[in-house]
Amino acid sequence: MRVEGIASEFMVSHSRQTALTESDAVEIWIARWLRVPRKDLIGRYGCDSRRLYEIWWSERFPGARAKAADAFRQRYPSLTDRTVFGYRRISRAPTAAMNRAQSDLFA
C-alpha cells in the first residue's frame, strides 16, 4: 500500500471558515500520522496553524487522539506497525539539566 495514495485524500482543498469539530480533529490526527504537510491541512480546513497545534497538544478535543488511533487501525491496518500514535511535544521551558549541560560546554 502506497502512503502517497493514502495521503492524497487529505490534500483536497476545502476553504471553509467554520470552527473545527471533533471529527475534524480525528481526521487531522490521522493526516498527521500519514505525514500530510501542515500547509495542506491548513488549506483543507481553512484554519490557522495554531488551531492544528491546539488539537495536537490536546488543548482542544483531548479525546480525539485515541479515537483517531482506533480509526487509523481500522482504515490502514498495514500501516499500524510503522506508526507511532503520539505527538512528541517539545518542552517550551529549558530544564535545569539542560542548563547545566550547556554551561559545562564552556567550563
Image (spheres, rainbow, N blue to C red):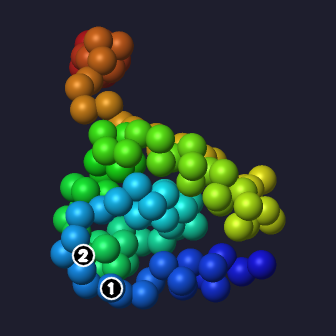
Compared to residue 37, the image places residue 55 above or below, namely: above
- Report crowding for label 1: few under 14, some 14 to 19, many 20 or more residues within 10 A (C-alpha): few
- Report crowding for label 2: few under 14, some 14 to 19, many 20 or more residues within 10 A (C-alpha): some
Find residue 57 and report its horizontal and vertical position in percent: 36, 42
* Left or right: 27 in relation to 51: right
The amino acid beneath tag 2 is Gly
What residue appears at the point 71 percent right and 80 percent down from the top-left corner? Answer: 2
* Picture quarter with the N terminus: bottom right
Quadrant of residue 45 in the image? bottom left
Whether residues under marks 1 and 2 lie with C-beta atoms below 8 angstroms apart, the answer is yes
Compared to residue 71, the image places residue 46 above or below, namely: below
What residue appears at the point 65 percent right and 60 percent down from the top-left corner? Answer: 72
* Left or right: 3 in relation to 23: right
The amino acid beneath tag 1 is His
* Picture quarter with the C terminus: top left
* Residue 79 appears in view: no
What residue appears at the point 41 percent right and 72 percent down from the top-left corner? Answer: 37
Q: Secondary structure at mark 2?
A: loop
What residue appears at the point 47 percent right and 48 percent down from the top-left corner? Answer: 64
Q: Look at mark 1 in the image and give the residue it sits on.
A: 14
Q: Look at mark 2 in the image and give the residue it sits on.
A: 46
Find residue 31 and report its horizontal and vertical position in percent: 50, 66
